[in-house]
Image (cartoon, grey):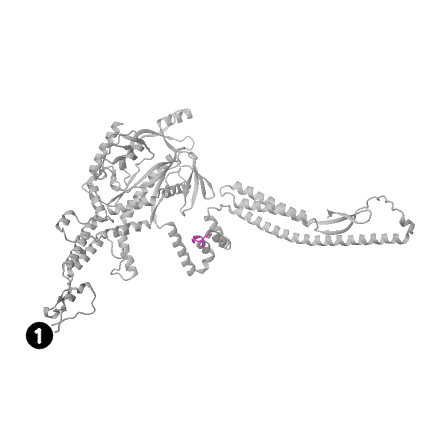
Amino acid sequence: MADYHSEAVKRYEDAVGYWNEQYQRIAEDFRFSNPADPQQWDADARNLRRGRPCMVFDRTNQFIAQVVNDARQNKAAIKTLPVDSKADVRTAKAIDGLIRHIEYTSRADQAYDTALEHAARGGIGWLRVVPEIMRPETNEQELRILRVHDPLACYLDPTSVAPDGSDAMYGFVTTRMSRETFARRWPKADASSWESPHSHLWGNREEVTVCEYQSILETKTNRIVIADPIDGIPRALGEDEYWQASQQAGGNLPVLDTFTAVARSVKWCTLTAHEIVEETVFPARWIGLVPVYGDEAWIEGRRWLCGMVRKLRPAQQAYNYERSAAIEYVALQPKAPILTSARAIEGYEAQWRTLNQGNPAYLPFNDIDEQGPVIAPQRLAPPALPASFVQLGQVASTDMEAAVGMHRANLGQQGSETSGRAIQARQHEGDTANFHYADNLTRSIAHLGRIVVDMLPRIYDQRRIARIIGEDGQHGFVTIEPGRGSPRTEGKQTLAIDLTAGAYDVRVTAGAAYMTQRQEAAQGIETILQAVPALSPALVPALMKLRDWPDAEKYSRMVLALSPPQVQAIANEDDEQQPRIPPALQAQMQQMQQHAQALQEALQAAGQDVEQLRSENEALKADKSIDAFRAETERMKAMHETQPEAARSEPIQPTPAPAPAAPTTIVTIPGIETVEAMAVTMTQAHERLQAATEAIAVASAESTQALQEALAGLTAAAQSMAVAAATAAAPRAITIQRGPDGRPNGAVAAPLMQ
């Protein structure tokens, strides 16, 4: 442990000795362009001009802001690319979503903007990525991209020459904290401050300086190449893995080749001046410290860095001097005096003496005295500013623009250009002259992306559900299943991935934000529709989808439903929510849907016929009841007239009930049944048909068996509905049963023999 600490101290001294001169120059540039207090006059110049104007008219920050804000409008996006046979494109897209979520939760845009501003201002900025524990109870970690606010607190391996620092073997990050914070984090550690070139600025009594140290450890291992017994693909195994595979195969496997591999690991420590207070493993092959360089030049084997300020300093100082000298010249000139004789103002001295203190309506003077006429007072011309001051100021301003290649058109000022094409050409020249700052940031973000991709399988080493963000900003989830192999998908949506399968690389693209791209796409479609209105059925659904309206997605689907079938087919292919159904099954589905529509129409027609027949049946029942009641009344009246009075006074004896009369069929009506039974049968068949159709719509694109099962359900439902319709349309006979008195007391429906 002591040897490792001593090695860290030795490496730190080497790094400080290499970077210290650079950092002194960068610190001067930072102080020179400090927006709050620009120090643009050195001590010698101030001493020589003591008591004289030393004005500062800073113009450096407008050039820096132009470069930084232009990059802010064209955000860099990390894209993952599969690079071997085990990698999968769908997994790469899911990794892109993970990285976007990491950038979102880390506020990585702040880290990118700060690094670019430091690189453009002084010549160097930094990016960091670290793992953080999110759930201590389960030790779940997530990655965070950190903003480095002090670029002079980081030191990289002096032997690193890569423009993104990918070849660095170690790096340091110094941090100052109060002694109370130090004692709370490491109560048993010695609060001895780490020696730093800037310790005198931070102080040693109230604060403690600690240092994070990351170093790469390389271990050589022997690798044995064999042919895989299953597929014959060459595989590289370690010695232990080779003997284990040979034992399982029952004999030594043939060796194709052997070589020595270098395994890399990163050790991560927090150091004080005398001890290591924290030690762990950084889960990556590279250190998590990435530089962002500005202007870089190698002279006699040594790197020299600078930003825009270093190139602007001479012209900015000349501009300040010229403006200060001009102000001084004007300030030292007397105010415009009035030339007059004593005779002209004799007796009015008080009024003329207070002329600059008020606004008198008139000034009297003596136009004549005992000596004769007096010349009236005259005001002399004000002091003129020498043209040399104005010209030198303009030259200094032009020199600043030329030093960084940005002219008035880039700063939004009126230049000598008059046409729009000329203005755009001059703006393009300025953007090209400083494009290397944004390009260097893109390189560094690409290396940061490689570190993140390398860390993901080490951080997500157990099954868990992780949040992802799509290119359109929509949030989603993906299940990470180490050891799964190929991803699990549903349609175009990836549900589960294996981060340990395959190798992936990173590229970075810079462009407008997604919302800006949507707006530009909508404007482009509108332009096309104005030129070619015939394309409206095809492009209007896409235009509705790009609008930032509430329920824009719903409106797009509504318009798409009215589009031609060819447009709907292409739109559904691009829709991740729609399954990719084989053409043969699509044709069968379309036939079944047409059949279902025909059966639905038949159901409605049968319902109307049944309602009409039921009305006729009710009317028939009513007529027969009235006839029976009239017959019974006539019979009782006849009995009353024929029987004598005595007989009518005798009690009426109950008459035994005769045997039930045989049922008599009085009417035969085709297509009649109770409305409730037929409606239930037809409705159930129609519901089965709808359910089968919905099953077809949600079937998985990659599961042909599921589609076939859903199609079989659709066919069965259609057959059931056809049987129900045929049953409803079959001729039936209604048999009315009569009681002993001849009145109807029931009805039975039975199918007629065909």
Q: How far across and how far down the image is residue 660, in percent?
A: 81, 44
Taking depth in this image into account, of 510 and 105 the one nearest to the observer is 105
Taking depth in this image into account, of 352 and 293 the one nearest to the observer is 352
Q: Is residue 182 visible?
A: yes
Q: How far across and how far down the image is residue 61, in percent?
A: 25, 51
Residue 148 magenta-highlighted: no
Dot 1: what SS?
A: loop
Question: 18 left or right of 670?
Answer: left
Which contiguous range is marked in magenta? 544-550
Taking depth in this image into account, of 188 and 532 the one nearest to the observer is 188
Residue 548 magenta-highlighted: yes
Q: Which kind of residue does numbered mark 1 sit on?
A: Glu
Q: How far across and how far down the image is residue 403, in percent?
A: 21, 52
Q: Quadrant of the N terminus?
A: top left
Pointer 1 local density, CA inside 10 Å: few below 14, some 14–19, many at least 20: few
Taking depth in this image into account, of 545 and 527 the one nearest to the observer is 545
Question: 376 left or right of 466?
Answer: left
Q: In the rendered image, which residue does mark 1 sit on?
A: 370
